[in-house]
Image: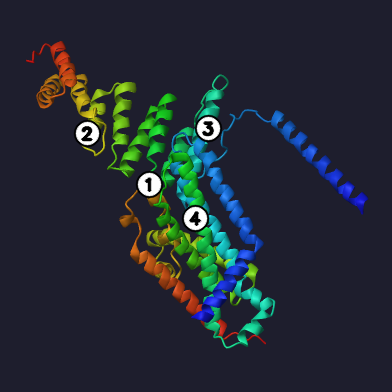
């Protein structure tokens, strides 16, 4: 009886060690043409919505984590491969389709897309976020920032920050930037008029000083 | 009432002694704990991830408990022939069904409370606050589990545990997808198909009505999220299920 137990224990140990060794050899042989961490297949959002049986928010979180992990793994592989990050947008799109109120996924996901210069995809993601959450200031704000800083399209930046300005909870610096965007978009008179209006409306010495400096640089003199 | 309560307490004690309950509960608590790890790799959305996945696990493991204990509730008594002792006592069969149901509901209530506190404790460790809003979500999860238990006990009254588990799991899946099924019917089916789908939609339990976890996590006001009509719907559906189970059990021949 004891001999049989020893035999089984021995078999267990041998099988375990062998499986570890085979696993390691599979790791060494793997690689090939595929990018590390490249998914072979991404299901559609509609399919996942049904398949999740109502646990779609949970699935959206898993997809979001997967997207960030994918971004990190592709970052490491940058010296070896062209056409990286091709699944980044589809993954973010999936996460936000499963949970359309996932503000963080739109915002941080958009930033990841900007980092890898997928501007069109970033715009799509932000616009989708705004369409799903029309009362939230974050996505129009980020769209304005993308158009201003990365694409230098000041008219579009102005358009989105004017929307942001109307939304509750927006950052307090937005109104100060709008005249600057008018100026950058070539609408100098409106910019000056808005700065003057702001100058007269505020008691804050620092803000008045900043606006005065800005106005004077355009040749407009204002009193103390 | 006291007879029903005695059976309920016995069912509760029996369930508490069941090793499968502890296995599921321990696994659920471990999985809820693992959300802490997921949250740390969630790149800034950790607070949402802990809540979403934690509530998801409470619902998922609660469903497993409801199904795997619920399907054996009546069948076990028949299989072990202890039912003869029970039906020979001055007790109505409907009292037996109600007692069994309430016993398992009590078990589920205790389990959901334990899992919710585990999740809240985890959030407290991470964020330093007690998120009592989660009780709204877990309350609705409990209501959903009560409906699932009702389905499980109904099948348990006339079928084997394996078949009961298959039927209950199928109804759980359909119940979770009923809104999509209706939408599908309205878009693609003909007149007859639409009528059939509409009938199915109203007859089967719409479990999606109890799923408010996403809205709670996104911070929507509870007054908008928790619908009193959904609660009424849940209790009415449970009543219908128990009444049907009582009818089947009443007419069952135990010879």
Residue under label 2 = A165
Crowding around mark 2 (Cα neighbors within 10 Å: few <14, some 14 to 19, many 20+) is many
Q: Where is residue B234 in the image (x, y as percent from the top left)?
A: 42, 68
Q: On the image, which quarter does residue A163 sit in?
A: top left
Image quadrant where one finds the C terminus of chain A: top left
Whether residues under marks 2 and 1 lie with C-beta atoms below 8 angstroms apart, the answer is no
Question: Disc 2 vs disc 4: which is toward the camera?
Answer: 2
From the viewer's perspective, tell me whether residue B218 is left or right of residue A31: left
Residue under label 4 = A53
Crowding around mark 4 (Cα neighbors within 10 Å: few <14, some 14 to 19, many 20+) is some
Q: How far apart are marks 2 and 3 (CA)?
A: 35 Å
Residue under label 1 = B218
Return the residue nearer the eye: B51 or B86.
B86
Q: How far apart are marks 2 and 4 (CA)?
A: 39 Å
Colouring:
rainbow
Return the residue nearer the eye: A206 or A134.
A206
Crowding around mark 1 (Cα neighbors within 10 Å: few <14, some 14 to 19, many 20+) is some
């Amino acid at each position: 009886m004891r001999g049989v137990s020893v035999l089984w224990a021995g078999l267990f140990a041998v099988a375990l060690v062998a499986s570890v060794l085979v696993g390691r050899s599979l790791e060494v042989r793997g690689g090939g043409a595929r990018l590390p961490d490249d998914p072979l297949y991404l299901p559609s959002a509609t399919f996942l919505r049904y398949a999740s049986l109502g646990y779609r928010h949970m699935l959206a979180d898993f997809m979001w984590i997967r997207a960030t992990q994918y971004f990190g793994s592709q970052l490491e592989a940058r010296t070896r491969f062209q056409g990286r990050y091709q699944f980044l947008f589809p993954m973010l799109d999936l996460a936000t389709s499963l949970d359309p109120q996932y503000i963080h996924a739109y915002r941080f996901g958009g930033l990841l897309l900007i980092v890898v210069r997928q501007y069109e995809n970033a715009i799509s993601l932000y616009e989708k976020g705004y369409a799903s959450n029309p009362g939230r200031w974050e996505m129009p704000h980020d769209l304005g920032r993308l158009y201003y800083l990365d694409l230098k399209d000041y008219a579009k930046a102005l358009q989105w920050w004017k929307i942001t300005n109307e939304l509750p909870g927006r950052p307090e610096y937005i109104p100060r930037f709008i005249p600057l965007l008018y100026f950058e978009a070539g609408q100098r008179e409106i910019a000056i008029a808005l700065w003057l209006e702001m100058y007269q409306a505020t008691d804050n010495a620092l803000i008045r000083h900043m606006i005065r400096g800005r106005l004077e640089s355009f040749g407009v003199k204002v009193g103390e | 009432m006291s007879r029903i309560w005695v059976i309920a307490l016995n069912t509760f004690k029996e369930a508490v002694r069941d090793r499968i309950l502890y296995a599921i509960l321990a696994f659920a608590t471990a999985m809820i704990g693992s959300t802490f790890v997921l949250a740390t790799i969630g790149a800034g959305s950790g607070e949402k991830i802990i809540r979403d996945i934690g509530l998801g696990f409470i619902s998922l493991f609660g469903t497993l408990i409801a199904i795997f204990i619920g399907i054996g509730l009546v069948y076990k008594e028949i299989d072990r022939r202890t039912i003869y002792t029970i039906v020979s006592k001055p007790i109505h069969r409907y009292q037996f069904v109600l007692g069994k149901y309430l016993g398992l509901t009590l078990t589920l209530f205790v389990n959901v409370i334990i899992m919710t506190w585990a999740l809240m404790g985890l959030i407290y460790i991470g964020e330093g606050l007690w998120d009592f809003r989660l009780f709204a979500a877990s309350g609705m999860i409990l209501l959903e589990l009560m409906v699932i238990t009702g389905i499980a006990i109904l099948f348990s009254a006339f079928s084997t545990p394996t078949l009961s588990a298959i039927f209950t799991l199928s109804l759980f899946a359909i119940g979770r997808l009923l809104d999509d099924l209706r939408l599908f019917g309205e878009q693609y089916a003909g007149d007859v198909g639409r009528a059939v789908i509409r009938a199915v939609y109203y007859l089967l339990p719409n479990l999606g009505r109890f799923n408010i976890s996403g809205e709670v996590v996104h911070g929507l006001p509870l007054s908008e999220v928790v619908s009193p009509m959904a609660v009424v719907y849940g209790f009415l559906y449970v009543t219908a299920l128990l009444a049907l189970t009582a009818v089947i059990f009443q007419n069952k021949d135990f010879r």
